[in-house]
Image (cartoon, rainbow, N blue to C red):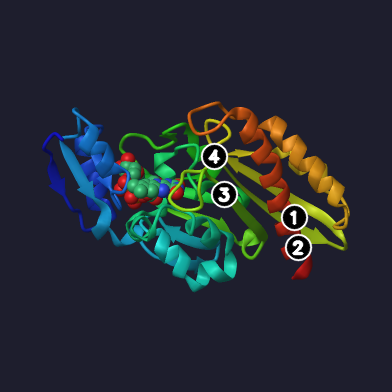
């Protein structure tokens, strides 16, 4: 590992000023569960590592007039333990519980998870299903993006070199929306997703009036299966066949790859099964509330 300077700003303004001075030759440190592995294996590391642990503006989970705000530095364990998340977006807890082991969840943050932007990231699908937005900041100000705009490609986000992720917002209309998450890996614990899936459903008067299907590890970034969503929108809440059809259509929207962990054909089977299960579960939640 190459040696580097360490900086620990006490505010967002201070952090952004240091970033502007050093861009692009710095790395931000959140929980470090990804970054430290990278630094140890890299011969050309940054000259500066800036620890975001002291930046209060990046922490906390709170209800705001626009929705539920989750700071980028919130850990997966904090998500699991948050009464506000349990009330408004419990599928986030289901997703957080699948990330690594307790130690990883204690250190790893939701912001770090999203910024790594690997196709299999487990925070992504539920946030896409809940139509989340992210706020990013640089010295010149803030930008708000849809989470789907934030994910650009494998390990590539919409962040400019001198910007950081501030927080994630679940918009008010999506709070309490019936949502389900499933992850398929090679084993139950400590495994990256071969496929992960989330769905949210709203019903009215016996019909599905809105559905969102999000799939991870099946394309360069987390995707929405919008054709599958259209199959069930407007359908009766009793129409289980429509859920199966939507799942089959979602398979055609994904671009899974063959790799050493699974074949594309196996992943397509998982997409069909996973999409059906999250739709079934979200619909059951929607119709029971
Ligand atoms: C053993 C192990 C198991 C794992 N299992 C899983 C798993 O099952 N599912 C899963 O999805 N992930 C898994 N991970 C990956 C990792 O733990 C998560 O992605 C974690 O959430 C990363 O967060 P962090 O705070 O540790 O990020 P860090 O390692 O601190 O940072 C990761 C990247 O994000 C950047 N960054 C962090 N915060 C910000 C910010 N606010 N603004 C801009 N850039 C930022 C950093 O500069 C760095 O490039 C695992 C990792 C390990 C080591």
Residue at the (47%, 65%) spot, across then down: 80
Q: Are marks 1 and 2 in contact (CB under 8 Å)?
A: yes
Q: CA distance from mark 2 to mark 4?
A: 25 Å
Give the structural element (helix, strand or loop) at label 4.
Answer: loop
- Image x and y of residue 15, in percent: 24, 49
* Residue that label 4 marks: 194
> Where is residue 6 drawn, in percent x and y?
14, 46
- Please identify the quadrant where the N terminus is shown: top left
- The residue under label 1 is 280
Q: Which residue is mark 2?
A: 284
Circle 2/circle 3 CB separation < 8 Å:
no
Q: Is tag 2's residue or tag 3's residue first in the polypeptide sequence?
A: 3
Which residue does the image show at 37% across and 35% down from the upper left?
A: 160
Q: Nearer the viewer, residue 239 or 60?
A: 239
Q: Residues within 10 Å of mark 4 (few under 14, many from 20)?
A: many
Q: Is residue 88 left or right of residue 244?
A: left
Q: Which residue is mark 3?
A: 183
């Amino acid at each position: 590992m190459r040696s580097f300077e360490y900086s620990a700003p006490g505010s967002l303004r201070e952090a952004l000023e240091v970033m502007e001075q050093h861009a692009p030759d710095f790395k931000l440190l959140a929980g470090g569960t990804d970054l430290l592995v990278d630094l140890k294996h890299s011969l050309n590391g940054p000259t500066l590592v800036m620890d975001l642990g002291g930046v209060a503006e990046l922490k906390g989970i709170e209800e705001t007039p626009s929705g539920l705000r989750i700071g980028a530095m919130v850990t997966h364990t904090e998500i699991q333990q948050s009464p506000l998340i349990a009330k408004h977006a419990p599928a986030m807890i289901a997703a957080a519980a699948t990330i690594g082991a307790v130690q990883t969840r204690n250190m790893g943050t939701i912001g770090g998870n999203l910024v790594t932007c690997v196709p299999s990231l487990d925070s992504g699908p539920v946030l896409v299903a809940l139509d989340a937005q992210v706020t990013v900041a640089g010295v010149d100000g803030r930008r708000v993006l849809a989470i789907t705009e934030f994910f650009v490609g494998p390990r590539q986000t919409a962040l400019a070199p001198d910007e950081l992720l501030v927080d994630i917002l679940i918009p008010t209309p999506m709070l309490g929306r019936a949502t389900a998450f499933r992850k398929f890996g090679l084993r139950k614990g400590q495994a990256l997703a071969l496929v992960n899936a989330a769905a949210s459903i709203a019903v009215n008067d016996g019909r599905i009036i809105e559905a969102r299907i999000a799939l991870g590890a099946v394309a360069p970034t987390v995707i929405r299966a919008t054709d599958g969503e259209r199959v069930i929108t407007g359908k009766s809440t009793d129409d289980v066949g429509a859920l199966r059809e939507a799942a089959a259509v979602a398979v055609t929207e994904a671009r899974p790859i063959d790799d050493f962990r699974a074949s594309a054909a196996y992943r397509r089977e998982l997409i069909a099964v996973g999409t059906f299960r999250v739709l079934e579960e979200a619909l059951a939640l929607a119709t029971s509330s």
